[in-house]
Amino acid sequence: MAYKCGRCKKRVEFDAGNIGIRCAYCGSKVFYKERPTVAKKIRSF
Ligand SMILES: [Zn+2]
């Protein structure tokens, strides 16, 4: 599972079910779930 650090915005990956995750770069514990690439087609006007 890929997350994005809420502080340094770096992309970090953790194993599913991993508790107590921490950013390896800045030590932040705030993460955003990184959404998979948007597959929906956006209609251009
Ligand atoms: Zn970080």
Image: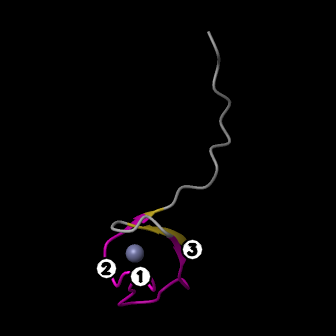
Question: In front here: 9 or 1?
Answer: 9
SS for tag 1? loop
Of mark 3 and mark 2, the one earlier in the sequence is 3
- Upstream in the sequence, badge 2 or badge 1? 1
| Disc 3 to disc 2, C-alpha distance | 15 Å
Q: How far across and how far down the image is residue 43, in percent? A: 64, 19
Above/below status of 18 relative to 30: below
Cβ–Cβ under 8 Å for marks 3 and 1: no
Q: Amino acid at mark 3?
A: Met
Question: x%, y% of residue 8?
Answer: 39, 68
Quarter location, residue 44: top right
- Between 25 and 5, the residue placed more toward the observer is 25
- How far apart in space, not on screen, are marks 3 and 1 (Cα)? 14 Å
Residue range in magenta is 11-32
What residue is disc 2 on?
29
Picture coordinates of residue 9, whole percent (x, y): 43, 64
Residue 7, compared with residue 44, is above or below; it is below
- Lateral position of residue 13 relative to residue 28, left or right: right
Side of 42 relative to 19 (left or right): right
Query: Circles 2 and 1: CB distance less than 8 Å?
Result: yes
For image coordinates 31% across by 79% down, the residue present is: 29
Q: Secondary structure at mark 3?
A: loop
Residue type, label 1: Cys
Q: Nearer the viewer, mark 3 or mark 1?
A: 1
Q: Earlier in the sequence, mark 3 or mark 1?
A: 3
Q: Quadrant of residue 35?
A: bottom right
Residue behind label 3 places its C-beta within 8 angstroms of ligand 1: no
Q: Quadrant of ligand 1?
A: bottom left
Q: Which residue is mark 1?
A: 23
